[in-house]
């Protein structure tokens, strides 16, 4: 068991699978005081918790639809009541825009903005309020994407817009909460294992085409993103706030 998360209480949204689950597991392995796994997929989320506990970590599950303000309040309250505070919040829950046939579908625009942007806004609202109450240093990590930095021809414009909003909400949070020693940073993964909701980004032909432009020449692994999140969550990044940490094998460098 490592010590990089020693004494810290963390809540990770969208942690029933993918990068959120990898992050929750890593936080527990690094000695977090407690990891709250939050998602709308209760059975899968409970399974991640069981796995963490079996490995000797401390974790709990909370049902949290990130678009619902009342559920945010309840999830944060539950975390604070059970574990005495909140030190790290990872706003990871999200949906893809790569399955859309119509890249200007209005209903999907609203859904993307609701989950990917408003979900992060509400997380910052309730998570940071809890951090301020304890007066301990806090770290918020918001999952954006390379799609929050550059456009793609095959993804709904709302995905880029929602992830771009996350990038700048992060910088606003850094500006507003620095004096309270609450840091806010964004992480920007590139080509990763497909999301549950992926369409074209899961297509082997599209992936092979994308990889031609990635200097490291391969897709990333969920633990490679979790490691970047861990750095931002831990005290090793104590002077890092408002930063955008790109984890894309060099995709956006060329
Ligand atoms: N996989 C990629 O290629 C990639 C690349 C860049 C950025 N990202 C971002 O990283 C994050 C994690 O993606 P992933 O690859 O692990 O995807 P994933 O689909 O495996 O995981 C996303 C999780 O979010 C949950 N979720 C969806 N809507 C929710 C809601 N309203 N409330 C609570 N939870 C909800 C899902 O149930 C799921 O468990 C997302 O924000 C995604 O946009 C992914």
Image: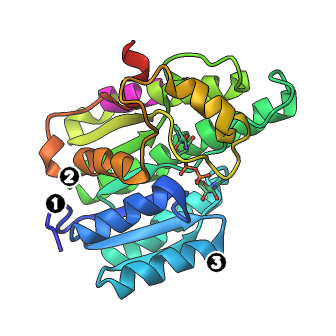
Specify whether residue 181 is in view.
yes
Looking at the rendering, the stretch of residues picked out in magenta corresponds to 168-175
State how far apart marks 3 and 2 are (Cα).
Answer: 29 Å
Magenta span: helix, strand or loop, mainly?
helix
In the displayed structure, 232 sits above or below 217; it is: below
Task: Report crowding for label 3: few under 14, some 14 to 19, many 20 or more residues within 10 A (C-alpha).
Answer: few
Residue at the spot x=71%, y=47% of the render? 197
Q: Earlier in the sequence, mark 3 or mark 2?
A: 3
Disc 3 and disc 2 in contact, CB within 8 angstroms? no
Q: Nearer the viewer, residue 121 or 236?
A: 236
Classify residue 28 by image quadrant.
bottom left
Classify residue 180 by image quadrant.
top left
Q: Earlier in the sequence, mark 3 or mark 1?
A: 1
In the displayed structure, 69 sits above or below 45; it is: above
Q: Earlier in the sequence, mark 1 or mark 2?
A: 1
Classify residue 58 by image quadrant.
bottom left
Q: Nearer the viewer, mark 3 or mark 2?
A: 3
Q: Secondary structure at mark 3?
A: helix
Specify whether residue 85 is in view.
no
Residue at the spot x=44%, y=24% of the render? 214
Task: Report crowding for label 1: few under 14, some 14 to 19, many 20 or more residues within 10 A (C-alpha).
Answer: many
Q: Is residue 127 magenta?
A: no
Q: Determine which of the numbered discs, if any, sits on residue 4 in the image.
A: 1
Q: Secondary structure at mark 2?
A: loop
Q: Residue tagged by mark 2?
A: 234
Task: Report crowding for label 2: few under 14, some 14 to 19, many 20 or more residues within 10 A (C-alpha).
Answer: many
Q: Residue tagged by mark 3?
A: 43
Disc 1 and disc 2 in contact, CB within 8 angstroms? yes
Q: Position of residue 119 (x, y in %)?
A: 59, 45
């Amino acid at each position: 068991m490592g010590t990089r998360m020693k004494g810290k209480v963390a809540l990770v949204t969208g942690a029933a699978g993918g990068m959120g689950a990898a992050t929750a597991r890593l936080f527990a392995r690094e000695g977090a005081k407690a990891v709250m796994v939050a998602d709308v997929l209760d059975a899968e989320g409970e399974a991640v918790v069981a796995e963490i506990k079996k490995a000797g970590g401390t974790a709990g599950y909370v049902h949290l639809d990130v678009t619902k303000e009342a559920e945010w309040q309840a999830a944060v309250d539950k975390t604070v009541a059970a574990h005495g505070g909140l030190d790290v919040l990872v706003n990871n829950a999200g949906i893809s825009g790569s399955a859309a046939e119509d890249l200007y579908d209005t209903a999907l625009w609203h859904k993307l903005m609701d989950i990917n942007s408003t979900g992060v806004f509400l997380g910052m609202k309730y998570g940071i309020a809890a951090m301020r109450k304890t007066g301990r240093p806090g770290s918020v990590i918001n999952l954006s994407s390379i799609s929050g930095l550059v456009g793609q021809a095959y993804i709904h414009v709302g995905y880029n817009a929602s992830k771009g909003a996350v990038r700048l909400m992060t910088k606003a949070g850094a500006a507003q909460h620095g004096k309270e020693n609450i840091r806010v940073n964004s992480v920007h993964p590139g080509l990763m294992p497909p999301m549950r909701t992926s369409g074209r980004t899961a297509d082997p032909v599209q992936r092979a085409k994308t990889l031609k432009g990635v200097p490291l020449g391969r897709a990333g692994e969920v633990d490679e993103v979790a490691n970047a999140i861990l750095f931002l969550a831990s005290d090793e990044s104590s002077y890092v706030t408002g930063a955008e940490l790109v984890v894309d094998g060099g995709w956006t460098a060329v």
